[in-house]
Amino acid sequence: MKVKPNSLAFKIWFYLALFLTIILFFIWMLQILFLDFYYEWVTKNSMKDIGNYVLELYNKDSEDIYYNALSYDNNVCIEIVTNGEMKYSSEAMNRGCLYYVNDENIINYKEQFTSSNKETSTYTINNPQLNNKTIIYAVKINENTNAYINASLEPMDRSIIILKQELIYVTIIVYITSFVVALYISKNISKPIIDMSKGAKKIAEGNYDSPICTDTKIEEIEELAEALNLARIEMGKTDELRRDLMANVSHDLKTPLTMIRAYAEMTRDLDNESVDKKKENLNIIIEEADRLNILVNDILELSKNEERKNILKKTTYDLTLQIKTIIKRFKVLSETENYKFIFKRTKPLMITADEKKIEQVIYNLLTNAVNYTGKDKKIIVEIKENKTYYRVSIKDTGKGIDPEEIDMLWDKYYKNEKNHKRNKIGTGLGLSICKTILVKHNWNYGVESKKGKGTKFYFDIKKEDVNSPKNH
């Protein structure tokens, strides 16, 4: 297997191995280099406790058996001297006890301590009998009596040698085992991340069908996988909408261009006497050119809204009058195709909003209603007051919308029929433009629809954006 130094698995393995090495290093430092110093320090402190206990036993005039037990339990030699004569020596641990050694240095240190005013004193000397390091702790019991406690450090030297040998084997075993465990851990932690990385590459390549799955129980990785799956789904939707948008815009561009070319050619081929036919053809060319212009303007408007370059310019104006004015623009449909626009409100409703943008919203919703209303060609516009808002609704009498499709209506060029249909009026981008404008105003919006009974689009104007509603 090829090792990649910058891979996640290698990094996890490396840092676990480094952590293990540091831990073993400190173990070696403490157990080998500082163990003898630590042992000596502990021994000196314990001998002070033993000296206090000897003093307590002597004052209680205890029997030798207590001294022997103390000597045996703590692995020390105890000697009690009164006026230069030995009164007690421990019998349990004779090997290494200094009172069996006739050495000038030992004699001198005893004389020095006897003549001094010290209550206690600690000496470290070389035991000539065993040629090893020995600790001596002296305690003044009274003016004539001293106690001497000594312990050899020779067993410690042997322990260090054994410990070194044992630690070498332990280190090798721990290293091998831990490196294998670290490799296993690194692979198990990195595997789901590597899988997600592969899944993310597929998403980047445009494959949105394969879900990103992980077998890990690590919460953060599961959350990351879930986030990537949500992004995959949304990007899939966006990609589908992009393809639909391109197809639909291409269709909407192609149709008027084809008609303009066809009628222009027909007009060119007409003789000078066909004035009425020429005018008819030219009117159709103008209408299709206007349709192209509206489409381009809607695309630019949508682009501006999505890039947040379009800033709201709020003013206070009468919404009732605005709706009536917009309905008049559809008068040609009422006269030529018997469309009925019903709006009964007469009271003014003064609101604070971007007048031109709200005009776009109402016009686009009316356009949508015209394209999808029923055979009676009826469109109903209403303004109803609620506790915290005024609801503006535009209802058609068409075939209605399936519930699962309602949330997608505000997407660009979304249609409840997959095959692109040329709108009677408008471009198919109207609802998406409405959505961005209403979001900018921070107004609620939505759709209510029943199959066979029509659809109602609405938006809610907050009462804080309405001026003196009580007077209306």
Image (cartoon, grey):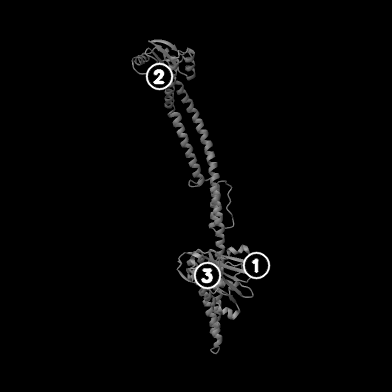
Upstream in the sequence, badge 3 or badge 2?
2
Alpha carbon separation for disc pair 2 and 1: 103 Å
- Quick one: 2 or 446, which is closer to the camera? 446
Note whether residue 176 is visible.
Answer: yes
What quarter of the picture does the N terminus occupy? top right
- Quick one: 349 or 398, which is closer to the camera? 349
Residue 440 numbered tag: none
The image position of residue 75, as x and y in percent, is 47, 19
Neighbour tally class for label 2: few under 14, some 14-19, many 20 plus, Cα within 10 Å: many
Secondary structure under the numbered disc 3 in the rendered image: helix
Upstream in the sequence, badge 2 or badge 1?
2
- Quick one: 423 or 455, which is closer to the camera? 455
What's the amino acid at mark 3? Answer: Val
Between circles 2 and 1, the one closer to the viewer is 1
Alpha carbon separation for disc pair 3 and 1: 24 Å
Residue 361 numbered tag: 3
**Left or right: where 245 falls relative to 137:** right
The image position of residue 292, as x and y in percent, is 52, 74
The image position of residue 103, as x and y in percent, is 38, 13
Neighbour tally class for label 1: few under 14, some 14-19, many 20 plus, Cα within 10 Å: few
What's the amino acid at mark 2? Answer: Tyr
Whether 26 is drawn above or below 369: the answer is above
What's the amino acid at mark 1? Answer: Lys
Neighbour tally class for label 3: few under 14, some 14-19, many 20 plus, Cα within 10 Å: many
Whether 265 is drawn above or below 63: the answer is below
- Residue contact at pointers 2 and 1, CB within 8 angstroms: no
**Residue that badge 2 annotates:** 137
Which of the 4 image quadrants contains residue 384?
Answer: bottom right
**Residue that badge 1 annotates:** 451
